[in-house]
């Protein structure tokens, strides 16, 4: 079922929302796919999708002109979105406006692959039921806020092999608001130059994975990867179970927080609003050219919550601006096989505002055995 058969305008001169809706309804009834041929199709009102496949001829050929394409609180699922572009015209971030490619739920067992999303507020702001969702092989560029946010109740969601550049907030985020994100993963993604916040952020949740990603060139207010109990709103579900952060490469990540004049590490574990009591396994990390520290342990909300249950194993660090370990709250972390070259100031800054932080050194560490004295920040 081609959208041309229901009256869509491939020149973009006329609104094709009604034609797309008709094609979706007819394809679902007939058990066929919706075909979007080459053209530029203007969509002025959001679409509702469930149990349907919408397939384009490739993102260079099939282009949907929309800043608000899919908006629905629930769906029966089974949605397949593949091989087209969505180009918005969002220039300002307005948090109350749903200027996103997807706002809400696609339903269980859905897939988004081969998409090009650009000039939106958020690429995918996912709430409700998105169980077993696959988000793979997409490009998300030039958003004014997040690239992808799993905003609570994401179970078994796989976000893998996507490319994200120039997002205005966290490029990839799991935020366990209203319900915990559970058993979900960010794997094999490339994140370049987020302009605000973190490359990849996990805010609460249970049994999550951040594996084999590349994050480069973070800017203000963030780290390459943040594992955090920052709630933002309630009800929030803190980190629990096992959080695996393995095989990630961080290039020039970490930044100065201009609001607090405070350096952010390349990889931050942050007991912002509550203690971290999950098992956080950090392994196989490569960090190159970190402007400040590499591993930061903090309680960014200023309440001195502890960070515990962290192991760091098998890291290779080259070109550290200040220190390898930046500990600013109570707790403990164990380090094994962490090697560092060209460390700018010292191995460890261990100056918690409250309590004591234990840097537990196992076997195979090298290149970062000295201590920076408390009282002043080391200059990079």
Image: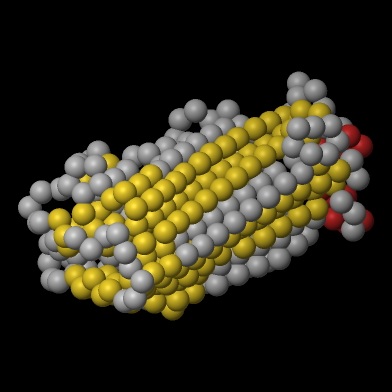
Q: Left or right: 246 with respect to 227?
A: right
Q: Quadrant of the C terminus?
A: top left
Identify which residue, 5 or 299, lies in the foreground.
299
- Furthest residue in direction left, as rendered: 375
**Above or below 322: residue 118:** above
Q: Which colour scheme is used?
A: secondary structure
Identify which residue, 16 or 307, lies in the foreground.
307
- Residue at 63%, 53% (x, y): give it: 161
On the image, the x and y values in percent for residue 221 come to 32, 44
**Above or below 347: residue 19:** above
On the image, the x and y values in percent for residue 331 come to 22, 73
Query: How many numbered badges does the structure rendering display?
Result: 0
Identify which residue, 272 or 232, lies in the foreground.
272
Q: In which quarter of the image is residue 128?
A: bottom right
Q: Quadrant of residue 256?
A: top left
Identify which residue, 204 or 75, lies in the foreground.
204
Q: Left or right: 303 with respect to 228?
A: left
Q: Quadrant of the N terminus?
A: top right
- Residue at 49%, 74% (x, y): give it: 207
On the image, the x and y values in percent for residue 318 come to 38, 51
On the image, the x and y values in percent for residue 178 come to 44, 66
Q: Visible in this render: residue 303?
A: no
- Residue at 19%, 65% (x, y): give it: 329
Q: Visible in this render: residue 57?
A: yes
- Residue at 78%, 59% (x, y): give it: 51
């Amino acid at each position: 079922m081609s959208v041309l058969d229901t009256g869509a305008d491939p020149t973009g001169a006329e609104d094709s929302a009604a034609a797309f809706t008709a094609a979706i309804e007819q394809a679902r009834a007939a058990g066929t796919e919706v075909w979007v041929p080459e053209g530029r199709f203007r969509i002025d009102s959001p679409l509702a999708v469930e149990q349907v496949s919408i397939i384009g001829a490739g993102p260079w050929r099939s282009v949907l002109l929309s800043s608000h394409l899919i908006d629905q609180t629930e769906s029966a699922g089974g949605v397949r979105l593949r091989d087209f572009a969505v180009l918005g015209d969002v220039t300002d971030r307005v948090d109350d406006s749903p200027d996103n490619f997807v706002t809400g739920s696609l339903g269980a067992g859905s897939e988004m692959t081969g998409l090009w999303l650009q000039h939106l507020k958020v690429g995918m702001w996912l709430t409700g039921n998105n169980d077993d969702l696959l988000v793979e092989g997409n490009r998300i560029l030039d958003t004014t806020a997040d690239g992808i946010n799993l905003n609570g109740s994401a179970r078994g969601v796989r976000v893998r092999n996507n490319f994200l550049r120039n997002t205005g907030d966290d490029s990839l985020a799991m935020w366990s608001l209203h319900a915990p994100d559970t058993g979900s993963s960010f794997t094999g993604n490339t994140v370049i130059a987020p302009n605000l916040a973190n490359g990849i952020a996990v805010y609460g949740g249970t049994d999550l994975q951040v594996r084999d990603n590349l994050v480069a060139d973070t800017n203000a207010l963030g780290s390459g990867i943040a594992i955090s109990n920052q709630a933002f709103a309630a009800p929030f579900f803190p980190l629990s179970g096992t959080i695996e952060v393995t095989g990630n490469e961080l290039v020039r990540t970490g930044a100065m927080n201009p609001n607090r004049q405070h350096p952010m590490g390349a990889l931050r574990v942050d007991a912002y609003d509550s203690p971290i009591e999950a098992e956080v396994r950090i392994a196989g990390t490569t960090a190159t050219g970190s402007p400040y520290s590499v591993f930061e342990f903090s309680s960014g909300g200023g309440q001195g919550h502890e960070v515990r249950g962290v192991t760091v194993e098998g890291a290779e660090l080259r070109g550290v601006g200040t220190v390898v370990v930046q500990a600013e709250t109570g707790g403990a972390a164990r380090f094994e096989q962490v090697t560092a070259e060209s460390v700018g100031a010292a191995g460890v800054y261990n100056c918690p505002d409250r309590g004591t932080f234990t840097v537990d050194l196992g076997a195979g560490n090298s290149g970062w055995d000295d201590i920076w004295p408390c009282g002043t920040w080391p200059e990079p």
